[in-house]
Image (tube, helix red, strand yellow):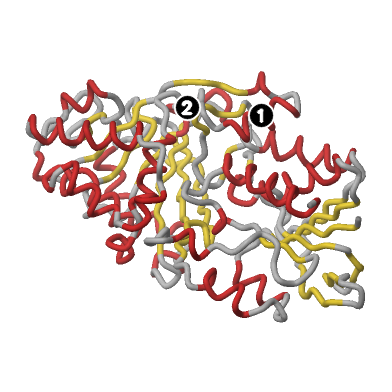
Amino acid sequence: MDIAVIGGGLTGLTAAYELTKRGHRVTVFEKESSLGGLAYGFKQPNWDWHMEGAYHHLFTNDRYIISLLEELGLSERLIRKRPITANLLPPNSKLSFEFGDGVPIVPLDSPTSLLRFPTLSLLDKVRTAALLGFLKLNPYWQPLEGITAEQLLISIGGNHAYKTIWEPLLYGKFGTYAPRVAASWFWARIKKRTPRLCYIRGGFHTLITALAQEIKHQGGHILPSKTVTSVQRESGNTYYVSWSGAKKLFDKVLFTIPTPLVTAILPILPHTYTLPLRSIPHLSAQTLILETDRPILKNVYWLNVTDRSFPFLAAVAHTNFMDRKHYGNHHLTYFGNYLPPDHPYLSLSEKELLSIFLPFIRRIASDSKFKIKNLKLFVAPFAQPVHERHYSQNIPPIATPLPGIYLANMDYIYPWDRGTNYAVELGMRAARTILQ
């Protein structure tokens, strides 16, 4: 079969890899010059490794992507470490611990750190431990789709712990959608989390490059910087895919791009199929990356910002996880947000955003004399679907009502939060659906 895959992220590349492995002729179309989607990597001239535009790591139980790495002969490229995760507490906490210099930064990544958490009573800690234990041990997410995360967190963990830890993070990420987020989404976040994390030597670019090479070796074609403008149905349930003044006939077409872009390219896709998908709210991911001569965070890899006076949700010190020697001996820190499409931050340049962030960055910096060597802004629309109650009921089959047309994008990853492991799993599932 001649199969078109529209979208060169991990889902599209994995599907193309699986299909070419079985002898099918596959062409991957990617509108950007780089492959990988949210996992794309960039590299400065003095770096040995690539780095992702948005912060990435793997959990040790991410079996789909780890199995793919093994199949591609890349298992030895996996680095496993246990970095420090901490919370920046609101200013009224008036506490400073070993990871903060003048600001209340406290670890929260183990049972011991929970017992030492300063602003919770013993009862709060017991209820929080019960909450986390329930989510870790409970294998059933479906009943949790009917209640909100807020209801779950308060009913088991208590109101004070919710207000101190979870509410600032939930509202910081989802904004006005926070009261509607399903408890099944929060279950997945806790269920999957492992203390030890993994990273791919050389960056996720290593995996993207290996996938692309294998697709080509197996007879597939990859067309970067090619925007598909239309897909038109021909007789016999075949489809013309048009791009850049060219077009080609395909037996089947797999879309891995956001649903609104699909309906613009293929307007004959039935409204009844796309309507539930188009009802899902989405947030854009935005990261501002600072390359500095000195570290901004002291030892901490991931800092959850529960002080909502700050203009960013998380600070992620990549070089507190991976050795800075791979990045010109400089320190790399992400400052991340999830934002609604109309948020004013999305219209700012990197320098304009830095001017807003910098006073707050200096407040958490372990060494305020750091100098910024490079600056990069990354924005990804449709990066975070909002999992509202009964979310799974909005997700139709991968095989659309149009024969030979398939859809598998970020919205199809549930109950799990979007991530590279599940992008790979979705690509495998899409390939199986096409072959069936």
Of the pair 195 and 396, the residue shown nearer to us: 396
- Asked if labels 1 and 2 touch by Cβ distance under 8 angstroms, the answer is no
Residue on which the image places disc 2: 197
Residue 21 rendering spot, x and y as whole percentages: 85, 39
Residue 103 rendering spot, x and y as whole percentages: 18, 37
User: Residue 238 vs residue 148: left or right?
Assistant: right
Q: Secondary structure at mark 2?
A: strand
Instruction: Give the Cα separation between the discs numbered 2 and 1.
Output: 16 Å
The correct choice, above or below, for 6 with respect to 247 in the image is above
The three-letter amino acid code for the residue at tag 2 is Leu
User: Residue 103 vs residue 7: left or right?
Assistant: left
Residue 144 rendering spot, x and y as whole percentages: 35, 51
Mark nearer the N terminus (2 vs 1) = 1
Residue on which the image places disc 1: 67
Q: Residues within 10 Å of mark 2 (few under 14, many from 20)?
A: some
For the point 16% across and 49% down, which residue is it? 163
The three-letter amino acid code for the residue at tag 1 is Ser
